Amino acid sequence: MRRGEAIPRSGRLALLSSPVVRRVAGLLLLGLAYYAAARLSLQLALVKENVTPLWPPTGIAVVAFLLVGRRVWPAVAVAVAAFLVNLPIESLPAAAATAAGNTAAPLLAATLLARFGFRKEIDRARDAVAIVVAAPLSTTVSATVGTAALVFSGAVPRSEFAAAWSVWWAGDAMGVLVVAPFLLSLPLLLHPPWKGWRRRAEALGLFVGLGAAGWLVLRTPIPLFFTILPLLGLAAWRLQLPGAAPGALLISVLATWAAVQVEGPFAGEMLSDRMFLLQAFNLAVALTSFFFAALVTERLRAREALERARTHLEERVRDRTSDLSEANEQLAEAHRIAGLGSWEWDMAGDRVLWSDEMYRIHGYEPGAFGLTFDKAVELVVPEDVERIRTNIERALEERQEVLPDLDYRIVRPDGEERVLQGRAKLVLGRDGEPARMVGTVLDITERARFEQEHEIAETLQQALLPKELPANDSLELTARYVAPGLGIEVGGDWYDAVELSDGRLLITVGDVLGRGLDAAVVMGQLRMAARAHALADEDGPALVDRLDHLLRRIDPAQMATVVCVLCDPATGEIRTVSAGHPPPLVLAPDGSASFLQTPPSLPLGVAPGTHREEVVTRIDPGSTLILYTDGLVERRGASIDRGMEALRQAAQDPADASESLVDHLVSTLLPRMPDDDVALVAVSFKEPPDRLRLTILANPRELAPARRALARWLRARGAAEEEVFEIVLACNEACSNAIEHAYGPVDSSVQVEASLGGDEVEVRVRDFGAWRPGRDDGRGRGLRLIEGVMDGVEVTPSEDGTEVRMRRKLAGAVRG
Amino acid sequence: MSQLADLTVAERDGVVVARIRGEIDLSNAEALGRRMREAVPNTAAGLVLDMSAVTYLDSAGIRLVIELQQRLDLRRQRMALVVAAEAPIHRVLELTDISRVVPVSAGIEEAVAEVAAAPDA
């Protein structure tokens, strides 16, 4: 009994919530129940109105001890005593002994049951056995004590002891055997587990059938009452305890009634025999009912546990399955996004399985048709089929587990061609023979197209930019062009450098607005025009003016910026003309960088007749001039001033020795994929060399370039113009002599070496022939000129040639 | 520059005026001499060689001048040079003492007058 739950806490009933009150009430209730049941059952008394074969009070007491605890025994004792007082038992000691015995029997039964590990749900076979063993054992106590008391008190004659004992024993045992289980099953009966009209009808039918059959077999004199046992078993099997307990009680009561009435199977038997028979029958009834019920319950419980485990397992399988199918869907989605198809070729059955994406790549609905190898190959462009077959045949022959990747083309049903990259693996069977082939296919059409476009753009751009840059002893040029965006477009930026006949260098860097083929074509024309005009000795402003005219003629809507720089490597003089172009940057030998101050000017193609000023600057040897287009300094969302400052800083940062200055600027300033294209040129003005070495062919046409080279060197060493002229004249005379007199009409060469020692220039001219006598006095005139302009001259003829050494002091020499 | 020097020929007061621009060296001296000889008809009083735009001149150029003078002299024609006194090539003329053979003037008018005015021998 659980405490307090159902009891309202209001009004007078609140009193009941006190544990003491409730305990006393419980004891009273138990005593009353015991007393009432005793009075009732004594109606069936067989022996002197005192002994009855149906004694439920013992069952009530056992249930009370089991449910509440054995400590409530006083209630039972008092109830028994009270009951006995009302009985015609004369002797008080006999009554007391009987009360003690009747209290001890259920106590012993409860103790035994507890010892056997009895569960009041009677849902295990051992519970059924426990009760069948405990009931007849414990009740021998009450039967013996009670009957003895009756005999001693003289209520029952000594001769009837056995009969009285058997009745007492049978009655008490039956209380424990069938009444107690029935009471214990009451909570179940109040809420019968059989749900639905079918089960209820079955239960009702079983009870009615049981009652009718019991009544029948226990009234007929033919001893057929054992046939009731299978029926009881059926009730127990179908309904378990809620069926077994009432069923057993019903049959026991019917049997007891028959035994009392001496009817049916009990007819004609002695009282004690009837009682033993009844007792045995009751034991069989109880055992059959409860054992069956418990067995079935156990089985049902096991089945339920199994069911639960199965359900749990099913749930887990369902969860896993849904996880898996989700993962599969995700994989399929990933394949779809990546354009990755997969396939499997079962070679023995020649069956080809395609993934959904595989069908989509080929332009079909997933699963549109079944496939064989030949059918799959039909979708490949004919030119590529052979390569696929060869690839597979070789793999089969050589048992290659991984086939080399293969790019091939397919044709979709709408005629579109796609490029696929195939990867395949050979799976060998247990016998080591090829069994299956599995593979993936990646749609690389876009990538292939991109690569092709990139290649075209690169080729075009290279064609539009100079193949090589001029180089000489005084200047070193490095240039870079960075393509815009992904590199599939051509741009309008350019750089160019051309050496003029006077030894100067024209460097142009320009930017035709926009990009793409149009801009690139205009760029190519402007670049070539600048080259042509420079070679025709146009000066900077005139050259830019020509470009302005040209641009307006090519495309009046187009604009371009350009900066033209004429560099004199000998003097370091640079003449700069800009047309709307960002100013060149000069990196001085001390590492500081500053922008050339070019006046603001209009871009090309804006206003005809615009005059642009030439800015003349001198650059120290060791400096670097940096020309660039705006892509290097313009960044979306940032001012160009900030970009130029960043360029200045980057130029001042010493570059990694392994990286050229232009590469350093590109990697520092440009993102990986610049929006705009960039052209960049760095012109390094080298320190002039101490020594000039020239080798000229023995041809008069070689004289002029040699004169220019020597003049540049002399100027760089600080020679005045007059000195330059005279030293060049002397050298030229020596060379002319060598060409004219040392050689016949054969190819040979003359070596010129100039060096500066202190403030004295020495020029040596050496040939490898034999001077022949002059045809006229020309040779003498040459020597006279040399002697006239130089401080000293020595002619040293030898076996294998002649050397002319000439010296001349300079007024303002520059030490190297 | 494909050509070191270019030559233009004009006629003034019966005098052929040949003007050379550029450089004269071993590579072009002979050719220039031939073209100038051809440019001077027998009827001309002589030749004025204007070298005021010559930036370089060496012994090959001097030889050209002397040979020209000798050829013209055979035909009783006279010759004069025009070279600015401050020109770098003037130094070459000085060193070779060319003025002893061919008169050197600083201006064209002067040179033409000298050639035209000379009495025939």
Image: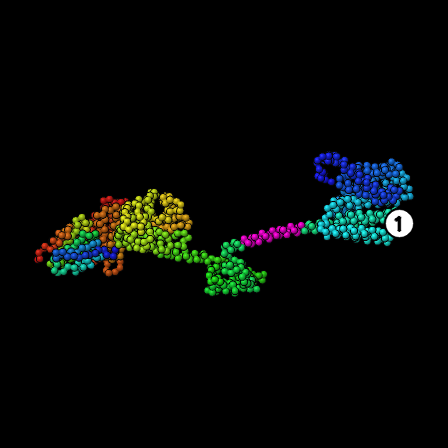
At a point 79% along the width and 40% down the height, the residue shown is A33
The subunit letter for the residue under badge 1 reads: A
Q: Residues within 10 Å of mark 1 (few under 14, many from 20)?
A: some
* Nearer to me, A14 or A131: A14
Residue B16: image x %, image y %? 14, 57
Q: Quadrant of the N terminus of chain A?
A: top right
Q: Quadrant of the C terminus of chain A?
A: top left
Residue A296 in view here: no
* Nearer to me, A347 or A127: A127
Q: On the image, numbered disc 1 is attached to which residue?
A: A269
At a point 34% along the width and 52% down the height, the residue shown is A512
Residue A609: image x %, image y %? 27, 50
Q: Main secondary structure of the magenta part?
A: helix
Disc 1 is placed on an element classified as: loop
A107 lies above or below A483: above
| Chain part drawn in magenta | A308-331
Q: What is the three-letter code of the residue carrying label 1?
A: Glu
